[in-house]
Image (tube, rainbow, N blue to C red):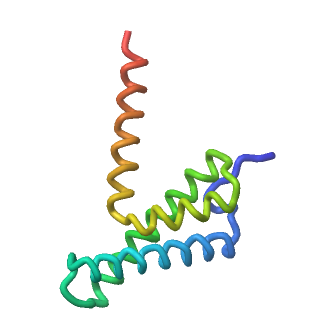
């Protein structure tokens, strides 16, 4: 089977990833309002949450595809990561940094 690239997925696939991501981002935003982290509803903050969640959702989707996870597990991970928002970005950034450091250490003579 040929390896997939980002342009080989259908619009329907991206639509469900985006919808799951926005749903997760909305749930995360409502949690922030209920816990008092955000004083009141703001459409600009919600839109920002959606952008972050969509980014995290797509990155999570690509990681799930790369690791050949089943679709249902991918959907769950996309929803959870989207709900986490910027915390998920920080976790992915830390993991990527560690992997890069191991890669550099392995290449040193």
Is 88 or 15 nearer to us in this picture? 88
Residue 95 sits in quarter: top left
Residue 41 sits in quarter: bottom left
Q: Work out whether 84 lies above or below 27.
A: above
Horizontal relation, residue 85 to residue 45: left or right? right
Measured from the top left, where is residue 33 in percent x and y?
27, 82
Residue depicted at x 47% and y 73%: 24
Is 26 or 48 nearer to us in this picture? 26
**As drawn, which residue projects farthest toward the top?**
109
Which image quarter holds the C terminus?
Answer: top left
Measured from the top left, where is residue 46 in percent x and y?
34, 83
Horizontal relation, residue 2 to residue 58: left or right? right
Measured from the top left, where is residue 23 in percent x and y?
49, 78
**As drawn, which residue projects farthest toward the left?**
39
**As drawn, which residue projects farthest toward the right?**
1
Measured from the top left, where is residue 94 in percent x and y?
34, 43
Number of numbered discs present? 0
Residue depicted at x 62% and y 74%: 16
Residue depicted at x 52% and y 67%: 79
Residue depicted at x 68% and y 48%: 68
Residue 6 sits in quarter: bottom right
Q: Work out whether 61 lies above or below 19.
A: above
């Amino acid at each position: 089977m040929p390896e997939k690239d980002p342009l080989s997925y259908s619009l329907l696939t991206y639509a469900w990833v985006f919808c799951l991501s926005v749903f997760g981002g909305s749930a995360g935003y409502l949690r922030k309002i209920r816990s008092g982290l955000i004083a009141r509803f703001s459409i600009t903050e919600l839109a920002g949450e959606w952008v972050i969640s969509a980014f995290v959702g797509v990155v999570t989707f690509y990681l799930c595809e790369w690791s050949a996870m089943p679709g249902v597990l991918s959907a769950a991970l996309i929803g959870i990561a989207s709900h986490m928002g910027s915390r998920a970005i920080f976790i992915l950034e830390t993991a990527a940094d560690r992997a890069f450091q191991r890669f550099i250490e392995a290449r040193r003579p």
